[in-house]
Image: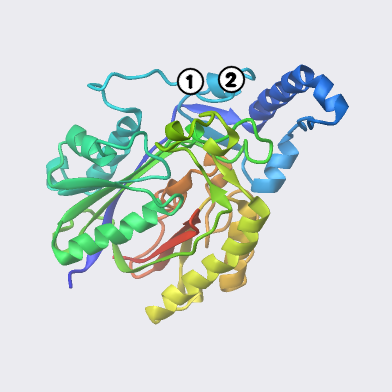
Amino acid sequence: MKNVVISGTGLFTPPHVITNEELVASFNAYADLQNAQHAAAIAAGTRSAITHSSVEFIEKASGIRQRYVLEKAGVLDPTRMKPRFAPRPDEALSLMAEIAVDAGAKAIAAAGLQPGDIDAVLCAAANMQRAYPAMACEIQSALGCGGYGFDMNVACSSATFAIQEAVNAVKNGSATRVLIVNPEITSAHLEWRDRDCHFIFGDVCTALVIEAEDCARSAVRWRVLGTKLVTQYSNHIRNNAGFINRCEDTDPDARDKTFMQEGRKVFKEVVPMAAEHIERHLHTLGLEPTQMRRFWLHQANLGMNQLVIKKLVGAELSGPQGTDLAPLILGEYANTASAGSIIAFHRHQADLKAGERGVICSFGAGYSIGSAVVERL
């Protein structure tokens, strides 16, 4: 079987930042408006008042200090509380494709390639802008790539699941060079009106080039030693938005049509699953967690990553940047769904030396967990 490498990475960062201070001011203004509007019901005990949020609550609960978004004014408008995107004609490049083309072009250039060298495009993200035509086909066309493309959605594990798909495609000969893009416009499916989660997500797009090692040209290459995926059904992270909704005569703006989770249950269940998954994956390769130079983990919650690393190697993650062993980008970018571990990999890989190894791992709704063990060449 062919050896396969990650030969290039790319990152698109949106132009707008929302700090925790800005977000809290907006949410609290929304809460005040709602509480005033429903004051009679609240006084009668038939409706609960909305509790204010705070910077301290957000940072203690998550480790997040800010997030990047594609549109800021709509999110911070207490009478709207969601981004304001202008509709585009069918002939125009879609928003997801636009940011994916940016990140994808950077990854292709980092790999020392031209778009025409790519013969497969995988668009892997937590939510797609439309059902069809596939976002991947639009991105493929806009970049000028060849071959084929398709979309895939495994929530926050979409990127790592796509890595396995790309690696297998190269190994079995159905592609030589695969571009993975992860356009995560999470601001559009986050419920900004919910105190328990209004701070969680940010927008971004990441990209990876996966190719056969014997034809890779880039100076920085990571051999993929192995990939491993697992899913276990859980109802604790959910979004009910979909094409069936219009046939159910339900409110398209109802609470269940955006991101929902039972955070405490997710934390309790996913952390041991993720740590066990990584340990088992390494053991199948004859490796131990303590032999890893770095862990590029899913960036959802500071506490989750702290506990995963403690279970694996007994180390402590301290401070907003994490540690050299497991760097964090969560404070700056917030949770970016499937892109989080790829941002960490993109930003924190240059200092590793030839022969050093690491694990890229994500975990999310499904539950779904994906990992790739890589070695610097």
On residue 108, the disc is: none
Q: Are marks 2 and 1 in contact (CB under 8 Å)?
A: yes
Residue 91 x/y as whole percent: 22, 21
For the residues labelled 2 and 1, the Cα–Cα distance comes to 9 Å
Q: Please provide percent x and percent y for residue 276.
A: 53, 72
Report the amino acid beneath label 1.
Arg
The residue under the point 15% across, 49% down is 119
Image-quadrant location for residue 94: top left
For disc 1, the marked residue is 84
Task: Please say if 359 is above or below 148.
Answer: below
Q: Which residue is mark 2?
A: 80
Residue type (three-letter) at the residue carrying disc 2: Arg
Q: Position of 79 compared to 252: left or right?
A: right
Q: Is residue 82 left or right of residue 39?
A: left
Give the image quarter of residue 129.
Answer: top left
Q: Pick the residue in front: 75 or 287.
A: 75
Q: Nearer the viewer, residue 307 or 368?
A: 368
The percent position of residue 208, horizontal first and vertical second, equals 30, 50
- Label count reads 2
Using the image, determine if residue 268 lies above or below residue 197. Answer: below
Residue 288 spot, x, y in % from top left: 47, 78
Q: Residue at x 18, y 73 (%)?
A: 1
